[in-house]
């Protein structure tokens, strides 16, 4: 018998102190690097995008992977990649923690569109407000003083 799963995650994390330092011209290099990490971990990427201070990744989590280990690997390896390649001169690291939200496969197309449109979306909504909305939408209890 084989193992069959459908674990669709939207992963969201920001730069340390939500610094606006992910320069638009170098984001594709970062996204390509993160895509490679996911591929090496047998995870299927559906969409990756973000703006100056955070990243959204929509992917299927392979059953051989733990979410916490995968996020740790993405953040550590991409930090090293950013610094070694001088992608974002003022980058000091990623924030501690992250948001990871599960969805049914039926939500995939809407999520892809949402993540693709991050720039226009954030012209009217801050990252903090967006993140709090995600927490509320998913019924996650939180203390606002600890939200990013």
Image (cartoon, helix red, strand yellow):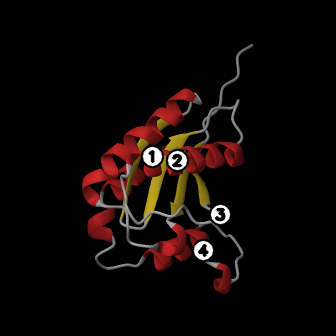
Provide residue 5's location: percent of width, then percent of height. Answer: 65, 32
For label 1, the crowd category at 10 Å Cα-Cα, with few meaning under 14, some 14 to 19 and many 20 or more, is: few
Q: Quadrant of residue 64?
A: top right
Q: Are marks 3 and 4 in contact (CB under 8 Å)?
A: no
* Left or right for 6, reference 49: right
Q: Are marks 4 and 2 in contact (CB under 8 Å)?
A: no
Instruction: Determine which residue is flagged by label 1.
Output: 84
* Foreground label between 2 and 3: 2
Which residue is depicted at the point 44% across and 37% down?
35
Provide residue 86's location: percent of width, then percent of height. Answer: 38, 52
Instruction: Determine which residue is flagged by label 4.
Output: 136
38 or 114, which lies in front? Answer: 38
Residue at the far bottom: name it. Answer: 145
Instruction: Determine which residue is flagged by label 3.
Output: 97
Q: Are marks 4 and 1 in contact (CB under 8 Å)?
A: no
* Distance Cα–Cα, label 2 vs label 3: 18 Å
For label 4, the crowd category at 10 Å Cα-Cα, with few meaning under 14, some 14 to 19 and many 20 or more, is: few
Q: SS for tag 1?
A: helix
* Left or right for 20, reference 12: left
């Amino acid at each position: 018998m084989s193992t069959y799963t459908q674990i669709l995650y939207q992963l969201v994390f920001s730069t340390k102190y939500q610094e606006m330092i992910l320069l638009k011209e170098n984001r594709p290099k970062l996204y390509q690097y993160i895509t490679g990490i996911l591929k090496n971990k047998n995870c299927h990427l559906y969409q990756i995008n973000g703006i100056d201070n955070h990243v959204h990744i929509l992917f299927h989590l392979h059953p051989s992977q733990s979410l916490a280990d995968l996020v740790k690997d993405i953040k550590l390896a991409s930090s090293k990649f950013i610094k070694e390649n001088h992608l974002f001169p003022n980058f000091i690291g990623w924030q501690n923690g992250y948001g990871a939200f599960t969805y049914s496969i039926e939500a995939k197309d809407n999520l892809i569109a949402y993540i693709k449109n991050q720039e226009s979306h954030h012209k009217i909504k801050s990252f903090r407000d967006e993140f709090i909305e995600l927490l509320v939408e998913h019924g996650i209890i939180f203390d606002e003083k600890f939200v990013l």
